[in-house]
Image: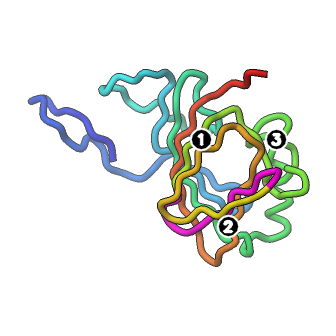
Amino acid sequence: MVTGVNDEGKSVVSSDGPASPWTRRPTGTLVMELWREDELPISVNSESTLENEVVLAPPATGVVVRTTVFPPDSSISAEAAAAYAAAMADIYGPGNAEGGAVPGMHTTETIDVMTVIDGEIWAVMEEGETVLRAGDTMVQRGTRHAWQNRSDRPTTVVTTMMPAHRND
């Protein structure tokens, strides 16, 4: 749902429909783009700059908001896990081929503010891990990480991704 202003200058719901675009990863994870802006700050009258495909990285001077639904890890077949590992460099960029010892381990050049809406998910770091449950928020600052849904039901998260750079 997106708000706007009508011809009389009154606030209204200007669109209400399914999230688009969306994509399904080989593991069954569903990623739905909600809003994309190419440049910050944004005019309140700006329209989303969503394209017809999900692009992981936000625009170089913008922001992207998406919903992701992670299936339980136990529902992911060995073939799907292998297909995901083979696609990691394409999904997350160079340097992310096959994730290493922890499936899905990757790095992005972003700051991500991720909130769990439903379910629970494990944030796995190179050293340590923590579980996030509905209502928990994590600020992921471009560090190497993976997500694991160790529960028996899907987990839904909303993430706002902003471009970032490294000072090294």
Q: Inspect the magenta stretch and tell me whether residue 155 lies in it.
A: no
Between 90 and 166, the one nearer to me in the picture: 166
Q: Please name the amino acid that badge 1 sits on.
A: Asp
Which residue extends farthest front? Answer: 128
Q: Is residue 47 visible?
A: yes
Farthest residue in the left direction? Answer: 8
Q: Is residue 57 left or right of residue 146?
A: left
Mark 1 surroundings within 10 Å by alpha-carbon count, few (fewer than 14), some (14 through 19), many (20 or more): many
- Mark 2 → mark 3, Cα distance in angstroms: 21 Å
Quarter in which the C terminus is drawn: top right
| Magenta residue span | 116-127
Q: Secondary structure at mark 3?
A: helix
Say what secondary structure mark 2 lies in. loop
Q: How many marks?
A: 3
Q: Is residue 145 left or right of residue 4?
A: right
Task: Indicate which disc, 3 or 1, sits on the residue closer to the N terminus.
Answer: 3
Depicted 124 relative to depicted 45: above or below? below
